[in-house]
Image (cartoon, rainbow, N blue to C red):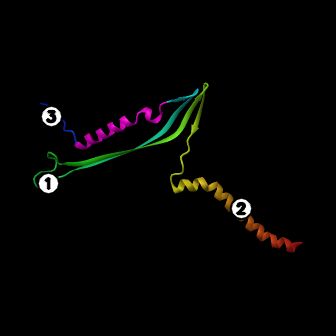
Amino acid sequence: MEQQEKKHPLSELMKTTMEHIQAMADANTVIGDPIHAEGVTLIPVSRLSIGVAGGGTEFSTKKQAAGGENAFGGGSGASAKLEPVAFLIIREGNVKLLPVMPPPATTVDRVIEAVPEVVDKVTGFIEKQQEKKAGPESDFAE
């Protein structure tokens, strides 16, 4: 007689979680349904980010040893984030990709976005300081 393999509750928990994520993350989630309007077709393109976590433990009580019936406690969780990235625009046989720029999400993003402006201001300030230093000397030289 062949011994039946016992399925561990954690693997069943993770399997169920992954099945639900797979149902959410189909191709229609990333490439959206086409939108038709006055000879133009817009197709939304998105980025899907998914995070998954799970864990569990075997435990024992005074009445039950570890590995017995119902000696497992665990949980799992998942998170999904859908962000628009671009639109494919189809008009008269021509296709264009129109990127969607989301607003800066973090302080670092804001700093990186502002760097060119900050560099221009700092450069202008340094140039003014150098002109001030050079100015009086050039008056005496004449």
Mark 1 or mark 3: name the one nearer the start of the chain.
Answer: 3
Give how far apart the Cα atoms at labels 2 and 1 are. Answer: 73 Å
Residue at 16% in and 50% down: 66
Residue at 85% in and 72% down: 139
Residue 3 badge: 3
Q: Find out whether residue 32 is within the magenta segment.
A: yes
Give how far apart the Cα atoms at labels 1 and 3 are. Answer: 27 Å
The residue identified by callout 2 is 124
**Chain part drawn in magenta:** 9-33
Q: Nearer the observer, disc 2 or disc 1?
A: 2
128 over 81 or under it: above or below: below
Residue type at numbered disc 2: Gly
Mark 1, secondary structure of its residue? loop
Residue at 73% in and 68% down: 129
To which quarter of the image does residue 6 belong?
top left
To which quarter of the image does residue 17 belong?
top left
Residue type at numbered disc 3: Gln
Mark 3, secondary structure of its residue? loop
The residue identified by callout 1 is 61
Q: Nearer the observer, disc 3 or disc 2?
A: 2
Q: Find out whether residue 118 is within the magenta segment.
A: no
Circle 2 packing at 10 Å, graded few (<14), some (14-19), many (20+), is: few
